[in-house]
Amino acid sequence: MMLRVMTDTPAPSTAGDIEQAQRREIDTPSSHVARFGADDALALDAGSTLGPWQIAYETYGTLNAERTNAVLVCHALTGDQYVASTHPVTGKPGWWTMMVGPGKPVDTDRYFVICANVLGGCMGTTGPASLNPATGRPYALDMPVVTIRDMVRAQTRLVEHLGIETLFCVIGGSMGGMQVLQWAANFPHKVFSAIPIAAGARHSSQNIAFHEVGRQAIMADPDWRGGSYLSDGVRPSKGLAVARMAAHITYMSDESLHRKFGRNLQDREALTFGFDADFQIESYLRHQGMTFVDRFDANSYLYVTRAMDYFDLAAEYGGSLPQAFLHTDTRFCVMSFTSDWLFPTAESKAVVRALNAAAANVSFVEVASDRGHDAFLLDEPELFRTVRGFLTGAAHARGIPAPGGAA
Amino acid sequence: MMLRVMTDTPAPSTAGDIEQAQRREIDTPSSHVARFGADDALALDAGSTLGPWQIAYETYGTLNAERTNAVLVCHALTGDQYVASTHPVTGKPGWWTMMVGPGKPVDTDRYFVICANVLGGCMGTTGPASLNPATGRPYALDMPVVTIRDMVRAQTRLVEHLGIETLFCVIGGSMGGMQVLQWAANFPHKVFSAIPIAAGARHSSQNIAFHEVGRQAIMADPDWRGGSYLSDGVRPSKGLAVARMAAHITYMSDESLHRKFGRNLQDREALTFGFDADFQIESYLRHQGMTFVDRFDANSYLYVTRAMDYFDLAAEYGGSLPQAFLHTDTRFCVMSFTSDWLFPTAESKAVVRALNAAAANVSFVEVASDRGHDAFLLDEPELFRTVRGFLTGAAHARGIPAPGGAA
């Protein structure tokens, strides 16, 4: 196992360069990476083991001498470890720079922040695009299907490797929130506090349905080639773009779409009576689809959506969600957004009810926002105030000094 | 112009027979059809004219001597003229047999019911799959893009052809409801009463977005071939199936999906850790996609979704919806469903407010149902009671005798 330090290379600009950069990040990421040998294999829910394997991650801030100030940020479906640093393929800022950084709610002057690419991902942690050492070709569908629990198992290995016994906090939104709940349920003594945002304890039928549409769009693309496109030197870009477009609608609310786009036309005065993007919303969606394929692998999309679909925390505990959290000492702050229809407040409330039934320490905040599920990634002052306040209180309880000095 | 009487042929059963039957219905439908020559061309919103052209339709009941009892039923996106008779391709019963028939709310013992396939459709009315007389091949994208107003224009020609001056009622759900509103706005003296159900006066940004995903899925299928697949002897079935799957989710509610499917597994005891349809909802959606391609044409799907996207009734009247209905004598009954998130009650209320502002005669009923947009096609007693009551009152006002004898 070895560590690599991120070099601040400029982002690629031509289409060919971007594709090359994306392929490079799969096995040799620009971030840190922890590599585990075949003797250090990961046991998976599917029943098989994965090894050798690797996990790519970024860190921010400094681990204190007591090793008590580590915060693990868990990313969502198409996120990555670049939570607060430049994305090496797109050149864009980190995906949660408003939340994580010096003086931010997750204050890197106070906390040591870790963010790792999920198992099954395509930014340096082992996934279906990674080279299968047994064949010398990308795994493709030979990669076992992974679960949220498998993702968390991989993270526990990284955390151990970094010499951290107990995380001060695990925080994340959407699929990141699922990982937070999984951590808290399986490793209560390793999680001092937990902030699951815009998530739920299981994936709903409607959410599975939207994911299945995306997967079918990918698999319908003849360039998917039964998953072996990377070996064949092609990519199912059209199918992946359609999958992204369908998903993207679910991240926004009807109100926010209406406010942002309404029925406004795109760079034209009148309807064209054709199938070009007459409306701004069409143009916006097509752009979302097209840019997504530059930074994401189609098989990874299959695997990570499948992991979300399989998530059902209560099922692991005999069908009882309170059982998942029994006798926990973890402090919870559960958050949802009023206009989120992908993970509506009712899903968060079900988690809160279970935590209450397990006599856990839990606070719950529903943020009023008309921006739908994506609100957790956007400038939502109440979200930031809540996270900052909750972490400050928890840090005080844990004896982590404030940046100024006093605990 | 000539009429053909429907022959009650058994539905095809093999895949090849089904495809052949679907292709036959495009130009030579099993239903009645009214054919108009080039001298009787249809002027379209796109600025072009269409001719020769034809409109396929079914009728039920008997037109009275005064010609005052005609009800026009307008179908939704993928519906057709077989509102209360067997579908010649699928062999399935009509799509609204609970609403239309002897003794039903739209009582064919009392009313003369007409239902026509929409312009741009693929069941016998001229659409992109129809033979282009100029080339001897299917129109494909040479068919002009049509609008809801064009669909209604085509229907007015059919109604005139049937010798009917004024329709007793125009009724329809979803895209059918858009046609109802278009009829009432453009031809107030030809519409005695109007029942728009689960519709709105414009297509929202979110709805355009879902349609655009479907269109992109179709156009991403290499078998679409720029629209010329019929001439090439192929069909973009995978793309069309994905489009249908995405749309189908929007027709149901989160609650109904949860109640119907939840996280139940399909014919298996445990997760398979693969990409087969583990969950019932996946299996159900795949089935919806696959059966849809048997009865629908991909280009028609592009055209009819585009017509809905273009619909914005207020825009025709200087941006003022009340202007669309000024001085109308039509009696309106506007209906919506509580769990419909595709055409939420707010859209119906906007119509009702405009009708009120235009001093129209309007009643409004929001039906409590957890079955989402599709509720208008399902067994919803309050829907049937409302339609029956409204029509009975309107029939009394128009002097249409009850089946027993008394008006």
Image: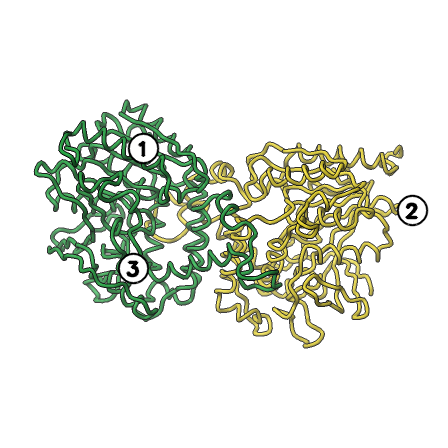
Chain colours: A green, B yellow
Task: Please say whether residue B236 is visible from this viewpoint.
Answer: yes
Q: Which chain's residue wears label 1?
A: A
Residue B342: image location, x then y, percent:
56, 44
Tell me the chain of label 3: A
Checking the image for residue B353, the label placed there is: none
Rendered location of residue A257, percent (x, y): 50, 47
Q: Nearer the viewer, mark 2 or mark 1?
A: 1
Q: Between A207 and B190, which is closer to the camera in this rendering?
A: B190
Seen from the viewer's position, the closer of residues B325 and A158 is B325
Q: Quadrant of the N terminus of chain A?
A: bottom left
Whether residue B104 is visible: no
Query: In the picture provided, is B174 more to the left or to the right than A2?
Result: right
Protein chain holding label 2: B
The residue carrying mark 3 is: A91
The single residue placed furthest to the front in the displayed view is A404
Q: Residue at x 20, y 34 (%)?
A: A191
Task: Look at label 3 and name its amino acid.
Answer: Gly
Position of residue A181 relative to residue B2, above or below, is above
The residue furthest right is B65
Which residue is denoted by mark 1 in the rendering?
A: A386
Q: Say left or right for B365 vs B407.
A: left
Q: Amino acid at mark 1?
A: Thr
Residue B65: give its label: 2
Residue under disc 1 on the same chain as residue under disc 3: yes
Horizontal and vertical percent position of residue A366: 39, 32
Q: Give the distance between the C-alpha atoms of the residues marked 2 and 1, in whole angstroms.
A: 73 Å
- Asked if marks 1 and 3 touch (Cβ < 8 Å), the reply is no
Distance CA(mark 2)–CA(mark 3): 75 Å
Q: Secondary structure at mark 2?
A: loop
| Element type at mark 3 | loop
